[in-house]
Amino acid sequence: MIWNPRMNAHLLLYVLLALFSSSGLAKAASLSLVGWPYELSHTSVTEPHADPILSDMVCPSLTRLNLLIFENEPYLLKSIEVRPGTWSLRLKEGLKWWDGSLVTAEDVEQFVRQVLSKVSSASAIPEIRKFEFETQKTESSVEIIWKRDPEVGPYVLNNHPFYRVKAQSQGSVMCAGLWKINSSSAAMVLEPTQNLSGPTIQIASQSAEPIQPPFIRFRFGEEIHPSGYTRQIETVLNCDVKLDTNYVSLLAWNTRQGAAREVKFRNAMTAMIPRGAILRAGAGGLGDLISAPILRSHPGYKKTLLVPPYDPQKAENLLNSIGYKRAEDGFRRDPQGNAFELRVFVKDFDGSTLLRKVLDDSFRAMGIRVIFSNQKVGDYDAFLASIETSWPDGELSSLLLNKGTNNEFPFDLIDGDTLAFVRRYAQSLTSPKPDFHLLEKIHELIYSSEPFSILMQHRMCMDAKTASGRSPSFPSINQRNPEWFKTVFQEVAK
C-alpha cells in the first residue's frame, strides 16, 4: 500500500441511525468495528470536521443527500416544504435526544438559526453573505421567512450535526443519534442511548490480535499481506467485499508559478507516471484509476473522460516542445538553460517510501531530478498527498481553493471559469435536486487543465463474522444508497 488513508465514513455509517428504529432489532449485545479509518482522538461531535463516524452514528444531520435517488431528502425531519420566501421544516414525531426527552420545534429553530448564520458568514459565495431571515415556530414545525429569496436551498443543512447544548453544563451537548460516546472508556466505545435497544459498538484500530466475533473489519492493501512485508505486492489481492473509499492519492501541481504553470508540463508529468504499476505494486490492485478527484461511482463523474495513458514518449515530446531538453549528462535544463529540479512536498513522508521511489525512478528516467521534502520551506512545484474527497456530494471547493476548509494546498488550483462552475455546483447541492451535470462540467475543466496527476483512488476490503463465527454473505452493494450498510450490520449482529 502507498500509505494508510483515512476513509470518509459517509460511505458507510450514517445509515446506522435508521437501523434499529425499524423492526428486527439486532440481537448481539456488543459488536466490534475494526480497522475503520478515523482518528481516535476525535471525540467532538459538533466540530465541522469531526470524524464522520461520530457525526453520523452519534450526531446526525437534519437532512442528507441520497445519491440512489439523485436527490436531497429530510433525515431527522419529517418533511421540508419550499414556498416563495419561506421554508417550512416539519418535525419528525417521536424524535428524541440522548436522554430520552423529545426534540422540540424550539430546538430545531435555535439550531437552524445558528447554522444559517454560520453558513452566511463563512461562505465562499459572496451572495450568500447578504441573506436575511426571521423564524416562526408552531408545536410541530419551524418556518424560515426570508426578507429576500436566498442564494441557497434548505439542504444547506446537510452535514451539520444536529445538537443541543445541555442545560447547566457549559460546552457539553446532546444529539439525537442512537449512540453516544462513552467518555469514561479508554477505548472508543459507542453505547446505545435511551432511544435504542441495540448493541454496544467497540471501535478499534487494525490489530494483529485475534478479533472476537461478532465483528466487521476493514483493511487496506498493506494490512492484508503478512506483518513486516515491505516489498512490492506481487499479486492482486482478493477479499470478501471490495468497497470504494473517498481517498485519492495524487500530485497537486502549483499552477501559479514555476514549471507547473504550463499545461503541457503538467500533461508530461502525468504521462510519465506509471499509475497502473503503482496501483498493482503499491496496493495489490485494491484501488481504481480515475481522471479527476471525483469517485468513479459518483453520478457527477464523467466516464467518457478516459484516464490518460502511461506514455513516456509523449512526455518526452511535450517536455522538448516547451524547452525542457536533456543536456549531455542526461538531465534536463529549463528553457533558460539552467539545471532543472522538481521540488515536491510530501504530506506523509514516512508512509510513502515505496511511492516516492517509483516516482523518483520514473522522473529520473525522463531526465528530471526530483527533491522530496516534508518541510514547508520555500516554494514547491507539487504536493504529494492522499486527500479526502467529499462524499456523497462531490463538492470540490475545499480541495481546489486555498481558502477552502481543508486547506490542503497553499495555492489555488483552478482558474476563474472553473471557479464559477464550482460555486454553481455548491449552490445546486443545497436544492432538492442537485445538478450533477455541473460536476461533469467541472470534471471536463479539470481534465483539460490537469492541475492534478491522479495516482489512484483507494479501495478497501470488508469481511465479517457473526457471533457464531459464521462468515455472512452480503448482497450486491451499491454505495450510492445511504442505507446499504443496514443489511450488512443486521446480518452480522443478529
Image (cartoon, helix red, strand yellow):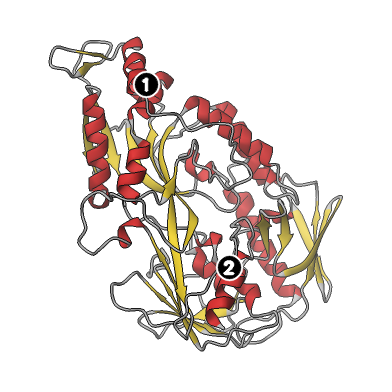
Q: Which residue is mark 1?
A: 265
Quadrant for residue 167, please give it. bottom right
Seen from the viewer's position, the closer of residues 202 and 315 is 315
Res. 439 in view: yes
Left or right of 108? Residue 222 is: left
> In whole angstroms, how far apart are the C-alphas of marks 2 and 1?
43 Å
List x then y, in percent, for residue 354.
Answer: 24, 46
- Name of the residue lying farthest toward the right: 84
Q: Earlier in the sequence, mark 2 or mark 1?
A: 1
Question: On the rendered structure, is 170 left or right of 366?
Answer: right
Residue 257 visible somewhere in the drawing: no
Q: Residue furthest left?
A: 329
Q: Amino acid at mark 1?
A: Phe
Please identify the quarter of the rendering in which residue 224 is found: bottom left
Question: Which residue is the site of mark 2?
Answer: 485
Q: How many marks?
A: 2
Residue 204 in the image: state x and y as whole percent: 38, 74
Mark 2 residue type = Phe
What residue sits 26% from the left and 52% below the top? 351
Label disc, if present, on residue 354 of the rendered structure: none
- Residue in view at x 58 percent, y 36 percent: 303
Badge 1: residue crowd in 10 Å (few <14, some 14–19, many ≥20): many
Q: Is residue 244 above or below residue 261?
A: below
Circle 1 sits in a helix, a strand or a loop, which is it? helix
Is label 2 in contact with label 1 (beta carbons under 8 Å)?
no
Give the mark toward the camera: 2 or 1: 2
Q: Which quadrant: the C terminus?
A: bottom right
Other residues around mark 2 within 10 Å, as few (<14) / some (14–19) / many (≥20): many
Compared with 472, 82 (above or below) is above
Picture coordinates of residue 72, whole percent (x, y): 71, 55
Q: Give the structural element (helix, strand or loop) at label 2.
A: helix
